[in-house]
Image: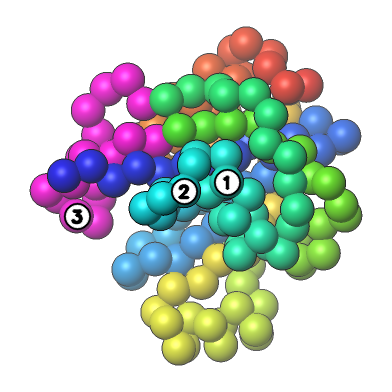
């Protein structure tokens, strides 16, 4: 079984990379914004939907950056193989969700979501000088972070 995920690298004018700090199924993850492709949806539309759902943010999806080229088993569903597709994303409006400076700095509203669902998330930017594969948790995200950092792509 395949699980297709679509993620966006959004880099601001200060050369900072947006990440999502999430508490999911009892564990903490720092990852790129995005999520699962729904049936009947294109990958770019999926990523636009995910940014809108997670951040209430309209984005433009620009360049394709990477598609998984190795086997990655799902951390949550061991009989699923992850196929992850990464794009560059550009905010078309100011970001209005609270942005944090520390990892996993959930506010009261986010904790209310956690109390209802057992999951929550918050967002922050990481400065280009501090950004690397070590900045993110998921194996494919680590590969993408290193590729983008090494290539100096998208202003990094």
Count of numbered circles in the view: 3
Location of mark 3 (residue): 77
Residue 86 picture location, percent across and down: 52, 32
Q: Residue furthest top?
A: 151
Q: Residue at x 45, y 33 (%)?
A: 85
Answer with left or right where residue 91 lies relative to residue 141. Answer: right
Q: Quarter of the image for the C terminus: give it.
A: top right
* Mark 3 Cα shell of 10 Å, populated few (<14), some (14-19), many (≥20): few
Location of mark 2 (residue): 41
Image disc number at residue 25: none
In this view, the residue in front, 117 or 42, is: 42
> Is residue 134 at least partly visible in the picture?
no
Whether label 3 touches label 1, CB < 8 Å? no
Image disc number at residue 45: 1
Q: CA distance from mark 2 to mark 3?
A: 22 Å
Q: CA distance from mark 3 to mark 1?
A: 24 Å
Q: For the residue labelled by badge 3, is the local secondary structure a helix, a strand or a loop?
A: loop
In this view, the residue in front, 43 or 117, is: 43
In this view, the residue in front, 74 or 128, is: 74
Q: Earlier in the sequence, mark 2 or mark 3?
A: 2
> Is residue 144 at least partly visible in the picture?
yes
Q: For the residue labelled by badge 1, is the local secondary structure a helix, a strand or a loop?
A: helix
> The magenta stretch spans which residues?
68-84
């Amino acid at each position: 079984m395949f699980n297709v995920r679509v993620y966006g690298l959004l880099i601001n004018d200060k050369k900072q990379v947006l990440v999502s700090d999430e508490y999911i199924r009892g564990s903490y993850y720092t990852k790129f914004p995005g999520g699962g492709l729904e049936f009947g949806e294109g990958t770019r539309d999926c990523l636009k939907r995910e940014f809108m759902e997670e951040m209430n943010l309209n984005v433009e999806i620009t360049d394709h950056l990477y598609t998984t080229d190795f086997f990655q088993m799902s951390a949550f569903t061991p009989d699923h193989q992850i196929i992850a597709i990464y794009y560059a994303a550009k905010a078309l409006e100011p970001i209005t969700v609270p942005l944090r400076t520390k990892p996993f700095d959930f506010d009261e509203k986010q904790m209310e979501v956690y109390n209802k669902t057992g999951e929550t998330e918050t967002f922050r930017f990481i400065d280009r000088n501090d950004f690397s594969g070590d900045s993110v948790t998921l194996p494919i995200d680590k590969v993408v972070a290193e590729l983008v950092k090494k290539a100096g792509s998208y202003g990094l």
